[in-house]
Image (spheres, helix red, strand yellow):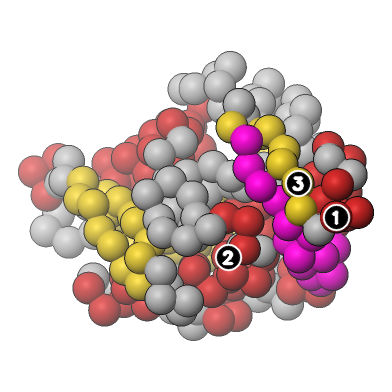
Amino acid sequence: MPSSRINFMSAAEKQLAGIMELPSPAATGKQHPDTFALFAHCFTCTKDLKAIVRISRALAKRNIAVLRFDFTGLGDSQGNFADTNIESNLSDIKSASRWLAEHYQAPSLLIGHSLGGAAMMASVESIPSCRALATLASPSCTRHLAEFLGSQNPEINSTGSGTVTIGGRTHTIKKQMLDSLRNFDLEERIQRINVPHLILHSPADETLDFQHAVEIFENTAGAKSLITLVDSDHLFVNRPNDTTYVAELIATWGNRFFAETS
């Protein structure tokens, strides 16, 4: 199926990189996608995380076009990751949505993994085209990440910056990022979500406790569904085939809402 590399500019005038996964008309029997989705990756991850690639391509097989992209300073995108924060992530999502609207169609489906899910939950109101939201292993607040990073290297809080190693890669983290995570009111944003919301999380996730999914389900305002992913880990390493299952769930669940608005 067609995959193409794209670039677009962020509000901070940095070039951001993405991959556009388009359905194949020969495979789907349709000339046009049923809808367009925007996919945000997890903290310090990239658009090329295997789970995100697999989910995006599986959705394309189900006639959902997907744009996945790298946040500022990560993957193939320009910028300094140390200077980013949750607010810059929201700005990058808005820039990606604008590019999608200008070149194809504004996204009807927003998808986010882990902290990318938090950013997507906070972005719903700023993307009027959104008709449905799917979050995968996402937090109900961002303070826990600030505390985790601070505990990994106390110099971040005491001197203003420090390095941490996540997933085998070392990143410089500035105190401004921790302050952003501590002060961002994600809970209030979740309470304002009024589009259908699919929440996917595994009780076996050792990176982010399942209680986060329960709290998101309790607080999100629109129609909502919570599905437990049995025995999956945070990055779908131990059960990679679960990514196909996740894509099937998102497509089957979401098509109902896309059909209602078409």
Residue 94 picture location, percent across and down:
48, 75
Please identify the quarter of the rendering in which residue 236 is found. top right
Q: Which segment did they paint magenta?
A: 170-185
The answer to whether the residue labelled 1 contacts the one labelled 3, judged by CB atoms less than 8 Å apart, is yes
- 100 in relation to 34, above or below: below
Q: Name the outermost residue toward the top.
A: 238
Give the secondary structure at mark 2. helix
Q: Position of residue 233 (x, y in %)?
A: 66, 26
Q: Nearer the viewer, residue 79 or 202?
A: 79
Q: Which residue is disc 1 drawn over? A: 159
Q: Is residue 183 magenta?
A: yes
Disc 2 to disc 1, C-alpha distance: 24 Å
What residue is disc 3 on? Answer: 162
Q: Is residue 235 left or right of residue 159?
A: left
Determine crowd level at label 3: few under 14, some 14-19, many 20+ residues with C-alpha closer than 10 A: many
Task: Compare residues 213 and 93 and report the one nearer the observer.
Answer: 93
- Residue at position x 38%, y 62% from top? 16
Q: What residue is shown at x 82% (from left), y 51% (from top)?
A: 156
Q: Is residue 226 left or right of residue 123?
A: right
Q: Which mark is residue 89?
A: 2
Residue 174 forms part of the magenta stretch? yes
Question: Which quadrant holds residue 167?
Answer: top right
Residue 83 found in image quarter: bottom right
Q: Quadrant of the N terminus?
A: top left
